[in-house]
Image: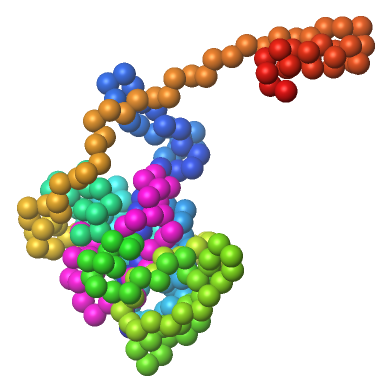
Amino acid sequence: MKVVVSIKQTPSTTAVLVVDGGGNVSWDDPGGKPNVLNPWDEYTVEEGVRLKENHGATDVIALTVGSEESQDALKTCLAMGCTEAILVTDPALQGLDSLGTARTLAAAIQKAGDVQVAIFGRQAIDGDTGQTPVQVARKLGWTPLTFVSAIKEISDGKITVERLLDDGKETVTASLPVVITTVKEINEPRYPSLMGIRKANRANIPTWSAADLGLADGAGTSNVDWSNVYAIPPREGSVEMIEADSVEEQAKILADKLFEEKVI
């Protein structure tokens, strides 16, 4: 069984967004690592590796669409236990929205060949839409299994999973192939081993172009407009210190002021 783990390199949660007067965006991280593997995808990678360990998966392929810098996130996946990694990168695929990304990922999954399970994180912390996985499922014509909190069984061409709902959990069975999105309750991601890190650093990650995927003309026009990016104006405010001879008098003055401002 071949498994694809779709991941994304995103800004670190500790990085600070900086927007200059011209609308140029950059990320400043005091830790020195502004870009990391999307935190939601850590659970995805872990579950992909567990499919190899517990359910007989022969190949676990980490896949992403992005710039050459995205190789860092793919090497993290290899260090965690993925058997292969593929980077899709091409100037024709820049500035994609979620639908364009879905078209690209679906084409890459088809090119990988004989994939039975494609696993995605719940969402990416930068775009935060959560739409790409179900769009990929639609493009592939596969069953989407969303918010999966446990993979129970894979046998006889079927998969049984537990889904996390707002008011409980449900167990469902579907025929392979499927697209799965995971939630953090599904596992506890492992730390990459020292040997895994060394092996990943030596890995030569293949890159696929748009032409390789049959998308030489691109993956469609983006419906998302990033032409006006600006920093939120700083919040203005003032502080007034209440002075009185006693705490009770201070409280009374505060209550009167809050009443005047119609706060209470």
Residue drawn at (43%, 24%) of the image: 232
Q: Is residue 86 visible?
A: no
The quadrant where residue 114 appears: bottom left
Q: Position of residue 42 (x, y in %)?
A: 46, 60
Report whether 48 appears left or right of 226.
right
Q: Magenta segment: does it hold 203?
A: no
Q: Position of residue 30 (x, y in %)?
A: 49, 33
Residue drawn at (41%, 90%) of the image: 155
The total number of labels drawn is 0
The colour scheme used to paint the residues is rainbow
Q: Position of residue 144 (x, y in %)?
A: 35, 70
Report whether 240 appears left or right of 183.
right
From what the image shows, is residue 176 above or below residue 45?
Answer: below
Magenta range:
104-132
Q: Quadrant of the N terminus?
A: bottom left
Residue drawn at (28%, 74%) of the image: 142
* Viewer-side residue, 219 vs 82: 219
Q: Quadrant of the C terminus?
A: top right
Q: Is residue 233 visible?
A: yes
Q: Magenta segment: does it hold 109?
A: yes
From what the image shows, is residue 44 above or below residue 50?
Answer: above
* Viewer-side residue, 54 vs 134: 134
The quadrant where residue 157 appears: bottom left
Residue drawn at (20%, 45%) of the image: 222
Q: Position of residue 192 (x, y in %)?
A: 48, 62
